[in-house]
Image (cartoon, helix red, strand yellow):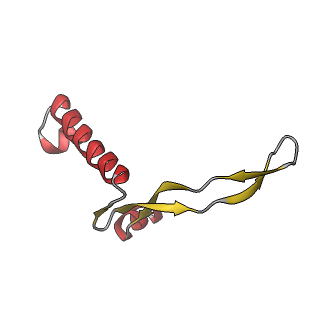
Amino acid sequence: MVANKTGMNQKQIGEVLEAILEVMKTTVSSKGKLTIPGFFTLVVKNRKARTGRNPQTGAEIQIAEKDVPSFKAGSELKEAADS
């Protein structure tokens, strides 16, 4: 569909998509923030250490602190989902 809308061929679209994904990976690995206005914001958040439970045994376990990517939908993306 993107190729039809842009007039680009599928190989070119694939290269553009790979470049976008690489920028997203670089942003996440450097703990940066990526925003495409109206569509989404991608940011890395820190999840603090906490106590959890092993679902098989019910025993308490310690879950280590770690950084996780967080995705927040923008207004245009939310409106598209509602229609």
**Nearest the eye: 14 or 1:** 14
Position of 20 with respect to 76 (left or right) is left
Residue 55 appears in which quarter of the rendering? top right
Q: Is residue 28 above or below residue 56?
A: below
Q: Residue 20's x, y, as percent?
A: 25, 46
For the C terminus, the image quarter is bottom left
Q: Residue 58's x, y, as percent?
A: 87, 48
Which residue is pictured at 47% across the width and 62% down the height?
45
**How many numbered marks does the figure carry?**
0
Residue 10 appears in which quarter of the rendering? top left
**Nearest the eye: 41 or 29:** 29
Q: Residue 8's x, y, as percent?
A: 12, 37
Which residue is pictured at 28% across the width and 67% down the height?
37
Q: Is residue 50 above or below residue 9?
A: below
For the N terminus, the image quarter is top left
Q: Residue furthest left?
A: 7
Q: Residue furthest top?
A: 11
Which residue is pictured at 34% across the width and 46% down the height?
25
Which residue is pictured at 19% across the width and 35% down the height?
15
Q: Is residue 75 visible?
A: yes
Position of 1 with respect to 78 (left or right) is left
Residue 35 appears in which quarter of the rendering? bottom left
